Amino acid sequence: MTELPRLPAQGGCSNAPILKQRGQREVFCGLTGIIWLHRKMQDAFFLVVGSRTCAHLLQSAAGVMIFAEPRFGTAILEETDLAGLADAQAELDKVVDQLLARRTDIKQLFLVGSCPSEVIKLDLSRAAERMTEKYAPSVRVLNFSGSGIETTFTQGEDACLASMVPVLPKTDTRQLLLVGALPDVVEEQAVSLLEQMGIGPIKVLPAPRADTDLGIGENTVFALTQPFLGDTHGALERRGARHLPAPFPFGEEGTTAWLRVIADEFGVDADTFERVTAAPRARARKAISQASEALRGKTIFFFPDSQLEIPLARFLTRECGMEAIEVGSPFVHKGIIGSDLEMLAQGPVISEGQDVDLQLDRCRAARPDLTVCGLGLANPLEAEGLATKWAIELVFTPVHFYEQAGDLAGLFSRPVRRAGLLKVEAAE
Ligand code: SF4
């Protein structure tokens, strides 16, 4: 029999007070989500309506990808647009006409709002409606905001997926919907494990193509694969779908608990569950125990970045033997990460939002063995002798489910080992 995850006494951090701070922030805006979403959705194009700053951000975040005719770009608002001298809607129509004439492979076009487009109150949702009528049925035009005013980093994916939910067709089929953009190999593993238990039909949001027969309705149950999907969660519930709350599938324990919630919903018996999961669980446990050697007994401090922080702290403390000092998240949505909070032993400060100077003071005072933060803080903290893990890598690297559990632990143990080696070298 599979043992149930061991719960810490008194419901873990479920009722822990949350330190809420608002001040200077060191985070990405939601535009960065486009970098992984455009690879996942193969017939979509993301047109950011923004400034040169937004174009620069995309270029530097996408790195070499910009040379491969990617499916994203920026319609740059010029001074005449900003000053209200030009009709920005007419300008946008022109840009979209040109784009769709040149790129006939595009089936979904996202008009992505930015800080400048929001500040001048450019109505992109009206533009999207108008364009949907104009280009139907070959192209669907949608709109979401990736601006720094409204969104932090992975929330861009949330805004994008949430914008798709209202236009999905209705279906009464009893089905499981997996929600969240995962690398293809990871998604295949998840679907395969569930199918081996006899669960189906399984659909995925975002679907790889616009014409996939993805519908939604009251007989749809959905499981989130990413913790940052609060708006999408709300949009799906408004369409009648039911959420299956579960810990997120990081590590052996998280993956098993996530699968178990779905298996229970679909009436999978204990023997089947055991038969399907026993071997991958054993592989995951072995890989984690090897990769986490350097982590045992070490302390960790999370700056807020992606909303993955709480589930990852749960994995690192329970499966890799680390001690969490502070777990910062841009947002804490208890309906979504409640199961992870429950499994996280009491002790760490749970913080939401950021006042970066105050948080840096806390981090320096605690001198953790490992600090998870963005690149803006990583090198300065390294210079102060603190080992860091760059948080964005956790969003780009395949880290979910059993087969990636060892790699996930490895992402954290590498900087700890390197810091240890550098200390030895310095002492010699
Ligand atoms: S959307 Fe806002 S925060 Fe993001 S790059 Fe553009 S101006 Fe900067």
Image (cartoon, rainbow, N blue to C red):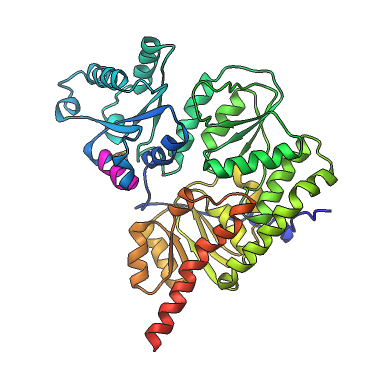
Characterize the magenta stretch by its predominant secondary structure.
Answer: helix
- Measured along the vertical axis of the image, is residue 193 above or below residue 243? below
Q: Which residue is rendered at x = 19% and y = 25% of the image?
A: 81
Check residue 56 for magenta coloring: yes
Q: Which residue is rendered at x = 32% and y = 47% of the image?
A: 63
Question: Is residue 98 toward the left or the right of residue 130 in the image?
Answer: left
Q: Nearer the viewer, residue 23 or 186?
A: 186
Question: In the picture, which quadrant includes the C terminus?
Answer: bottom left
Q: Nearer the viewer, residue 89 or 251?
A: 251
Question: Is residue 66 toward the left or the right of residue 277 in the image?
Answer: left
Could you say where residue 173 lies in the image, as x and y percent from the top left?
70, 20
Could you say where residue 32 lies in the image, as x and y percent from the top left?
38, 42
One can see residue 274 in this view: yes
Question: Is residue 381 toward the left or the right of residue 13 in the image?
Answer: left
Q: Which residue is rendered at x = 20% and y = 18% of the image?
A: 87
Q: Quadrant of residue 110?
A: top left
The residue range painted magenta reads: 55-63
- Measured along the vertical axis of the image, is residue 79 above or below residue 8? above
Q: Quadrant of residue 261?
A: top right
One can see residue 369 in this view: no
Q: Which residue is rendered at x = 50% and y = 46% of the image?
A: 331
Could you say where residue 353 lies in the image, as x and y percent from the top left?
45, 50
Could you say where residue 298 lies in the image, as x and y percent from the top left?
55, 72
Task: Single out the residue that lies furthest toward the bottom.
Answer: 428
